[in-house]
Image (cartoon, rainbow, N blue to C red):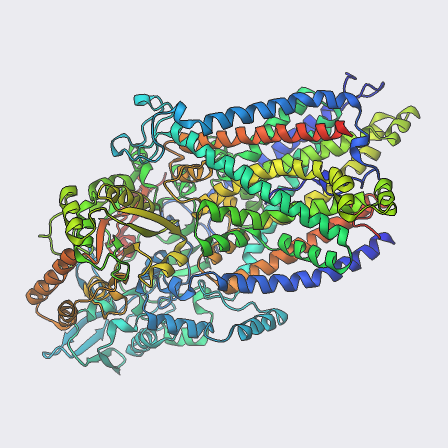
Amino acid sequence: MGSVNLRWSRVANLLPVLFGITLVSFLLLRLVPGDPAQQILGNRYTPEAAEGIRKGLGLDRPLLEQYGLFLKGVATGSFGESYQYRRPVGELLLDRTAASLMLVGLTAFFCAALSIPIGLWAAVRRGGLVDQGTRVFFTLGYALPAFLIGVLFILVFGLKLGWAPIGGYGTGFTSHLGHLVLPALTLAIPFSTVLVRSLRASTITVLDSDFVTIARLKGISEARIMSRHVLRNAISPVAVVFGINLAFLVGGTVVVENVFSIPGLGTLLVGAVSTRDYPVVQAVALVLAVFVVLVNLLTDVVHGVLDPRLTVGVQR
Amino acid sequence: MTRSTGLPGHRPHPTRVTTALGGLLTLALALSACAGGSDESTSPDSKSTPGASSAVDTLKLANAVAIDTLDPVEASANESIWLDQNIYARLVQTDPAGKEIVPDLADKWEISDDKLTYTFHLRPGVKFADGTPVTAQDAKWSIERARDGEDSAWGFLITPVTDITATDDQTLTIKLSTPHAPLLADLAMYAYAVLPQKAVEADKDFFNKTPYGAGPFKVTSLSAQSGLVLARNDNYWGPKPKIATVEVSIVTDDNTRLLQLQGGQVDVIENPPGNVLKQIAANPKLRVDLFDSTRVDFVSLPLKSKPLDNVKVRQAIKAALDLGRMNTLAYQGNAKVATTFFPYKMLFWDESVPEPVPDVAKAKQLLAEAGFPNGFTIPLIAVSADAAGQAQAVVIKDDLEKIGITVDIQSFELSTAYDKQRPGTNGMGMRYWTNDIIDPDEVATFGADGDGGANAFNSYWKDEAVSALVTQARSEVDDTKRAEQYAQIQKAIVDQAPFIPLSYAPFRYASGQWVKGFNVSPLGNYNDSLLTLTVAEH
Amino acid sequence: MTVLDPAQLDPGSVTGRPRWLKVPLPRAVRGRPALYLGVGLLLVISVLCLGAPLFTSYSPTEIDALAVLVPPGTDGHPLGTDAFGRDLWSRLLYGGRYDLAIAFGATTVVLVAGTAIGMASAHAGGWVDAFVMRVVDLFFAFPFIVLVIAIIAALGPSLRNMFIALWLASWVGYARIAHGQTMSASRYGYVVAAGCLGYSRRRILARHVLPSVLPFVTVFAMVDAVGNVLLGASLGFLGIGIPPPTPEWGSMIAEGQAYLLSNWQLSLVPGLALVLLGVTFSLLGDGLADLFRAKQ
């Protein structure tokens, strides 16, 4: 019953946020210098040609009207047409979102696979070699920029060993996944840093708790304690963090998408900002926001499921 | 070991960790290997004929920039334009060397004595890729669409055209109000490609699906962000290409593109980073290709930013710049020092103009004569993503320091940079120019004609005599007279220096030695070379 | 933006009681080396960078067209030169000043501002709190990279504008942590008691709530500091970083990207310097965390 109430109030909180997103993404770029017509014309810019283009794009109408049109479009499921690609934004989004989702999903998988065993081990063998060693290794992974790690991976696994393709996205589902392994690993490493340390911290807490001590005294096997109690309780706060940062990931994958040539939302977004492709920026910002919000909601639910006596957010 | 918690009976689980890690690694590598092993067909959503992915009849090209659109009227990215040249045909085209106009869809044409009427005869039996015949009506419709389209920026090229008539299915007549020397060059431009009218009008989304025209290739699959696949057009009037398929992928990261070439995953890449050219050339399996281009880098000295309105100041700046050193640092010596603002060796390029030699003493003297013996401070607006431009800006700053001018480099991303340069009041600006046609009319209008709409490359410099010359040269049909007029125009720019051309940068490509015959014209087009190119097993 | 640590968001969520009360003492003693090592490393880096003229005779911005891309060890260039002939070691040292500035400058401001906002909002409660938290949610949901690019596009790439962009993009993390902590803290007996005793709001916040908020935001700040420098590098990669010829590790890494396959040290050396900075802050963070825990 606690979780159900949680969900509705959370949903209610979302609506102003989403509305705010549409407003911010609409206004932000228009307040910044830079004319989409300039981008389209490049060196052949003349004021007349620019006027013509602006008119064709509907940019000469009052701001409020443009915003209204945009909202109306969103309500009917149309995001308009991209200035740069001359295609409906919805089509562009569909292709790119699939790629980003797969990348993020695979990254999440690697994060879990990397951080859970290592985090647990580091907690269980506190102060040991693994504990200290992982700190250094993960700081390395965290502080080295993604494009350095990415190129290193390509050099080693792609060129020298030939175990992985050198960038690109492939055709067909398994090929896509195969192409996403290296980029996902590149993203997973810095992400895992924080996860490992949080898992370590929360595992230590649980291991030291009265609950576990009593269980041990009762003679319950170590394996059972680990799997039944420690894992479950330690993971739930990590799940929250996982969720929050996962959401960042979709927008923050630009560098990796660039290095590995993955046609994802990150490069679409950044490219659109540079070329002042307003419809695309508005649409992608909205989609990302919805994604963030959904993921947060999901992790709240998962969190609630993993530890039902928990509530996120204080009742006053 | 129990030291970690101090409690008895506590056994950690090292095996769990190792198995998990081991399993993860194996799974990951297995997945990669699946994809890596099958990288013969890493083309985007390839629905091309099965078995066509054998290395011999497919060319894999990696571009650095995404395709914006394949509508030739609206495309602005160079890479899209060069692809358009493979898909669509025009009435006439430029020859592979980029110097002359040769027949394309029209195999002959007549020009009336008063130079006001052009009559084009279409090749008998010429067809679009879908088998329907190309008619003069298609040509008329396409040209008018390019000229009059709402979003089109190309009308200005053919303003003297008063009438376009399809006198019959095979004949197109164009009438002019005044003689227009660049007309053929204009019609050879990608925007004036002949499109299948019925097909384009029938489908609003024509250019986003599998567009085709009357060119040597047609599109079989298109994904603007990951690339496209071209297949041979069997209805093409010209020589049949030796390759059946071209797979174009978009790889924006410079290093990744190079690594793909080194790994044999692609055959040709564009824009390898300048500093690795030696490395590529040293690799026996690869080669570096530098092709002359129409690119001219320049720095604008807008007269609206004081004290650049003083011609002596501009000349002083010009005298202080060491273009050779700039070349070395920005292009690793692979570019040429610019002399005039006309692209290198283009039609009527004045080869008698000497390369500028830096003369710091003279520069200081000019500056003193202008009234600024102690120099001044001025901003320089550069584009942050343009590595060469950034390098040039740094050298400019360094060079001008020697004569007392302090340059404040302000880098912005492209849109903002151009926005700030436009009013001309924000100081110097880094720019570059590339031609769309082989006729000098375009660059002369944009660069030397103060009334030409671009304010002489944003310098707001105007010289009535020069503007008159530009207009005159446009309708001048005598080549000798035209050459003389353009020589005068180029000299005026050299003397008055409203902007200073810096380098002629070539197109950079790298390819495997297994590819023979890849060639790029100064306009950037490689469609001609694709007709005779061969790709061997590798 | 930086990845968030859950320990700082819901400290009481797992066991219902503050974590630091549960950690056994031996932990605290063991934690000290981290703090000392962290401080020591920071001192070394600061001395090297701030006292750069003592350690190198080359200028970080002087162009030498004759010594372009020389390998490490030639001609008195211990790490070689870059594409303009500038000495890499010199650029590393002088550049470190900018990065220390980013790591501290960008971070301290958001630390103070974000924490203040979070605490004040939580304490205020009611619709003020609801509104502020919605704004925080908005910032979280909006792709920060767009925000950063837009800000830099509007104002132009420079160190100052990068600060502004970083401040605007990062303050929400601190606000959320501080908010969460303040909310939990308000449940503690001693805070409620203080309220009953009639202590002023400010006193309650400063004396009783702040000590429980501080450890979390400080540790988060340590991670954020490195994240900020990294963001600078990513922006450089995208072409809107700190403009040339200013040396700064992030932009050096980004500039060196084009030479990765021929002169990899141009990117890798500042990259490793960044890692060192990261390790330093990580040690500091862990040390501080342990210190706070021990203090309780």
Name the residue at 78% across, 32% down: C20
Q: Is residue B333 visible?
A: no
Above or below B161: residue B211:
above
Name the residue at 56% across, 61% down: A25
A306 or B86: which is nearer to us? Answer: A306
Q: Residue furthest left?
A: B480
Where is residue B365 shown, x and y percent of the image?
Answer: 14, 47
Name the residue at 40% across, 52% down: B412
C28 or B37: which is nearer to us? Answer: C28
A93 or A9: which is nearer to us? Answer: A9
How many discs appear? 0
Q: Is residue B276 visible?
A: yes
Above or below B384: residue B137:
below
Where is residue A227 shown, x and y percent of the image?
Answer: 81, 33
Give the quadrant of the N terminus of chain A: bottom right
In the figure, is residue C10 to the left or right of A214? left
Q: Quadrant of residue C280?
A: top right
In the figure, is residue B480 to the left or right of A154? left
In the figure, is residue C294 to the left or right of A180? right
Above or below C216: residue B422:
below
